[in-house]
Image (tube, coloured by chain):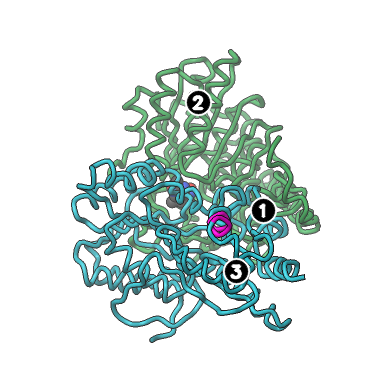
Chain colours: A cyan, B green
Amino acid sequence: MKQMSYAAALVDGLYEALASDEKVSIVSGHPVGFGPHRALMDRVYDDFHDRIFDPPNSEAAIAGMGAGAAMLGERPFINLSTSIFSYVGWSQIVNDAPNVHHMSDGMLTAPVVYYGLHGVRGNGAAQHSGSPQAMLWNAPGLQIALPSSPSDVKGLLLWALRSRNPTFFLTHAKLLSIEGPVAEGLYETPFGVAEIKRAGRDVTIIATSLMVVVALQAAETLAKEGVEAEVVDPRTLTPFDEKTLLASVERTGRLVVVDECPLRCGVAAEITATIAEKGFKFLKSPPVRITRPDVPIPFSTPIEDELVPNAAKVVAAVRELLR
Amino acid sequence: MSSNSNPPLDKSTAQRMAERMLVMRRFEEKTLDLFQRKLIPGMYHLYIGQEAGGSAVLDALGSEDSLLTNHRGHGHVVGRGSDLGRSFSELLGKANGLTGGRGGSVHMCDPERGFLISSAILGSNISLALGAGYAIKRSGEKKVAVVFFGDASLEEGITFEVMNIAAMRKLPVLFALENNNLGAIALHEGGYSASNSVLKQFTRIPELFGVKTVQLLAGDTLASKIAGAREAVDYCRAGNGPVFCELQSVHWPGSNMVFAQMLTGVMDLGMAWGEREPQGEHAGWVRDHDPVLRMAREFIAAGLMSRDELLALDRKVCEEVECAAQFAIDSPLPEPQSAYHHVFA
Ligand SMILES: Cc1ncc(C[n+]2csc(CCOP(=O)(O)OP(=O)(O)O)c2C)c(N)n1
Ligand SMILES: [Mg+2]
């Protein structure tokens, strides 16, 4: 184990993938941006120069290129940068790659990995603050990964690049600098396995991506008040580990879901519906969703803060729930 | 436009152009200063180095025309005459900003001046301009829709779709390409945004669709640029269909990285007439390519403005900019509850 940042772990995963499978290649080589983490990619460029293509700004073309190449056995990592640029290649991402297997009667598959940074990064305003995972979750055949820790980002990436199915892999600008222990070398974190990030008996908080960090902060505060929150991270939306989530709610009897998508038909909506449908008998009180409201994200800090889920909002919701 | 047969400029045009270019420059210098003082949150992109082409196009427009721009749009907005205080307020995320602090640097707009939205999605603004052209054509009015965009937008497929439709329907759209690619540092060289295309001659794209092209080259005189811009706007306004106008500029070294740096120093008009010499690594850009200094030299040589007139104008602009910045600094932030406003009309 080595202590490293989320960004470093992601780059480490890419490096290991390139080193271990020569079918892996990268399209757009700056998945950790052009800011302080840019230099992390230097060693990948140094050692795999000929397997990185920095494409023109042509998201639709590279999205289709990734799916098409994957159909011929390539393992492309298609970096769409800010994940909302995926909207430009939406048809290829939600209507081509995930449908290939089904449309070909199971003869073909397009296991491309699409990558992007989602969420409210801070003053990104309406067009650069989106979280496409809820929309993506409505595309059958597409896997979705939302790693929340350095260890997960590396392991899930290595799994995605070996999976037989297409994946959208979403990170978050505000996760890039967080530190955690990461195993060296090659390891995979399987999709479809939720992780209990913190055990607790009083309430289950299900969260994804950056909201896991927010939920853990909230849990710390609540612990000081004698409330033990269990924080569960599904890690992937498709495949979705209902079992672990249901088992947690069975233990605690209470559910809060924290999610950065807008409320309606968001990730929290689907998680809550699933628990309500299959675990209704475990619930001692109605489930609570803490999400962005159905409002575009504005530029200025006070109005942005107002809309974004944070630890204080989670703490307040849990207090209310346990009153 | 490289022909030398342009009609000489008149004094009032020169005065307007000088003021517009100085406003653009001083506004951006102040923006960088405010950012470095940590007063501007988020991303922003400066217009420094591109003032000549943008000003020429803006000068050719009428008050009824529609405009759109992209992420690098401050120059277009203040060059169109938007209130400087409200423009700075927007950059600072203040309640009285052009868009109430909602849009910030990359979404400025000012419908009162015909300024429709700034879209930060490459190619999107071009498609919105197609719609503006469509509406204008349907209305039968003799107006023009202008869209400013960077060379990276030519890498997006939508740009080609738009050209095809604009040409097919003869829509009054002026595609103003801000080609700031001369001397830009490419991604693989450690820079940020240089063009990544097999095409080096961008005007070949509109030509494919039979769209008229006009080039305002970096080295052209302002007189020639103004003539070129007028030709483009007039052609469009007359109902002949779209025009593609390439506004070429030499990349400002300060914007090679994601966050701009004042690598060329604050502009000093005295350098236009040798009172002081540019220094440092980027002295060459200042000496040969700074559009504001070039403007000053050209206008003085043509007898359109004197040194003293230019200096006085610059002092006035600097004062206005300073005042506007202070107005923004003193302005209130939006109330948290206003976050929920304006989702639906
Ligand atoms: C669809 C889309 N892809 C990527 C981006 C990210 N992006 C913002 S500005 C930019 C470069 C723009 O270069 P150019 O158009 O030449 O404009 P310049 O910055 O040089 O003025 C990129 C890639 C974006 N905004 N939209
Ligand atoms: Mg450019």
Residue located at (54% from left, 71% from top): A248
Q: Residue B173 carries which label?
A: 2
Quadrant of the rendering where the N terminus of chain B is positioned: top left
Query: In this rendering, would B197 be left or right of B267?
Result: left
Vertically, is A286 above or below A102?
A: below
Magenta highlight: main SS: helix
Q: Name the chain under label 1.
A: B
Mark 3 crowdedness (10 Å alpha carbons): few <14, some 14-19, many ≥20:
many
User: Where does residue B144 sit, x and y in percent of width and height?
Assistant: 56, 24
Q: Which mark is residue A205?
A: 3
Q: What stretch is highlighted in magenta?
A: A271-277
Q: Count the marks.
A: 3
**Residue B45 seen in the figure:** no
User: Where does residue B114 sit, x and y in percent of width and height?
Assistant: 65, 31
Query: Do badges 1 and 3 share one subunit?
Result: no
Give the mark, 2 or 1, whose residue is nearer the N terminus: 1
Looking at the picture, tell me which residue is in the foreground, A94 or B308.
Answer: A94
- As shown in the figure, which amino acid type bears the numbered disc 3? Ile
Mark 2 crowdedness (10 Å alpha carbons): few <14, some 14-19, many ≥20:
many
Give the alpha-carbon distance from disc 2 to disc 3, as whole Å.
53 Å
Vertically, is A107 above or below B127?
A: below
Vertically, is A163 above or below A232?
A: above
Q: What element carries label 2?
A: strand
Q: Which residue lies furthest to the top in this view?
A: B140
| Residue A291: in magenta span | no
- As shown in the figure, which amino acid type bears the numbered disc 1? Leu
Residue located at (76% from left, 54% from top): B328
Residue ID for mark 1: B91
